[in-house]
Image (tube, helix red, strand yellow):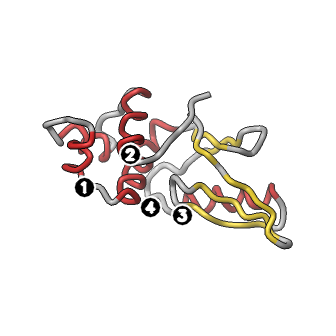
Amino acid sequence: MYFKLDIEKSGRWFAISCDCLGVFTQGNSVEEAKEMFKDALNALVEEGKSKAQIEFADDNQGFKIVNFDEMIAFIMERLRHQSELSIADLADELGQKSKSLIHRYLQGKSIPTITRFDELINAMGHKIFIA
């Protein structure tokens, strides 16, 4: 599962961003920008929680989080806040009466299937691609 990544040359800098997760940074080279991106993403992770282990796609158009199961609650909560949806709103978007399972996903107590994760992400107005 890959998240879309944008890398653009801006003057002497290489700007790198993942709109989906709201992470933006830059570096003097593509490689430095990618390292800065890893640092920026992990700076958002709560103290004491697992840090994201990232692998970039060969074409630099996306990245995957290797330790995805450990990071899924962080990712979903980050996306939910960006979409400005409450847990009740998200349940409504999914046509689900119970909010408890969504809450368990957001707390990391349950891990959704890839299909369910995709549905959750789409309900929050984001897209991911699976490769």
The 10 Å Cα crowd at callout 3, few under 14, some 14 to 19, many 20 or more, is few
Read off the residue under disc 4: 47
Label ID, residue 86: 1
Identity, as a three-letter code, of the amino acid under mark 2: Ala
> Marks 3/2: CA distance?
16 Å
Query: Which x, y percent locates residue 24?
Result: 61, 64
Q: Where does label 3 land, which residue?
A: 43
Crowd rating for badge 2 (residues with CA inside 10 Å; few <14, some 14–19, many 20+): many
Amino acid on which disc 1 is placed: Ser
Please report whichever mark, 4 or 1, sits nearer to the chain's N-terminal start.
4
Q: Regarding mark 3 in the picture, which secondary structure is present there?
A: helix
Residue 105 at x, y percent in the picture: 31, 40
Residue 91 falls in image quadrant: top left
Nearest to N terminus: mark 3 or mark 2? 3
The residue under label 2 is 73
What residue sits 80% from the left and 55% below the top? 31
Marked residue nearer the N-terminal end (1 or 3): 3
10 Å neighbourhood of mark 4: few (<14), some, or many (≥20)?
few
